[in-house]
Image (cartoon, rainbow, N blue to C red):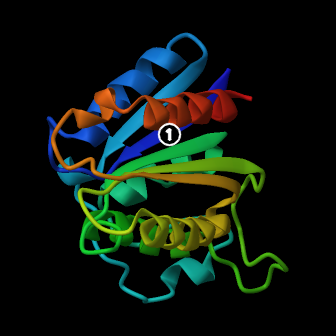
Amino acid sequence: MKKILIVNASKRRTGNSYTLEKRFAQQLEGKAEVTTFHIGEKDVRACLACDACKRQHTPNCIQKDDFTALIPEIDSCDAMLILAPVHWDQFPAQLKAFLDRTYSFMDFTQPDFSMAGRKDKKLAGYFFAGFGPVDVYTNMVETNLKSFATAGFVDYKAHVAGDANVPGSIMEKPEDLAVADGFAEWLLA
């Protein structure tokens, strides 16, 4: 059974990220072992840039927070799904800290710069934008998702649902829901 990590980077419990998380959980039930990580409810500190992780040969971090405890899950999962709003044309701050902390997987002595235990994992990023240019946001998401390759996520897909600021409004967008359903199938394949 596949191991899928869902990372929800929204603080809005009634928002679209949580609404879609429930839908994904239903679709994956019985088909995958799912672990969910709600960044907004966790202690995920900024990277210290101390390079202590570079003196080890397995992904690790000297900080003792919720991200450090999640490193084994990140390393051993088959796929990760990120659900998040777009904040000021970027990742939400907590998700950016999460991404920065994957620096703990980087090994400059490796040809692919990665000490991830697995380097064949899938990553889906599904984001919600209230206003603004969806094509620009999609480019931003794709650019940031590429950085997760250090943690072994080499195959990725990105989607930004536009005009999705009202909590729960994603359920009224059949085209965006079809993309989500395709993501679920792709993560399981």
Q: Residue at x 57, y 66 (%)?
A: 142
Q: Is residue 108 left or right of residue 92?
A: right
Q: In which quadrant of the rendered view does residue 116 lie?
A: bottom right
* Residue shown at 38% from the left, 36% from the top: 36
Judge from the rendering whether residue 68 lies leftward or rightward of residue 110; answer left or right: left
**Which quarter shows the C terminus?**
top right
**SS state under label 1:** strand
Location of residue 18 with respect to 185 vertically, above or below: below
User: At 56% across and 65% down in the image, what residue appears?
Assistant: 145
Is residue 113 rendered to the left or right of residue 16? right
User: Observer-nearest residue: 161 or 50?
Assistant: 161
Q: Residue furthest bottom?
A: 50
Q: Is residue 185 above or below residue 93?
A: above
Figure quadrant of the N terminus: top right
- Residue 151 percent across, percent down from the top left: 62, 62
Residue 24, image x, y percentages: 45, 26
Q: Which residue is mark 1?
A: 5
Q: Is residue 167 left or right of residue 156?
A: left
Q: Residue at x 22, y 58 (%)?
A: 43
**Badge 1: how crowded within 10 Å, few (<14), some, or many (20+)?**
many
Q: Measured along the vertical axis of the image, is residue 144 above or below residue 123? A: below
Q: Amino acid at mark 1?
A: Leu
x then y, percent, for residue 91: 35, 68
x and y, in percent, of residue 48 in the image = 36, 85
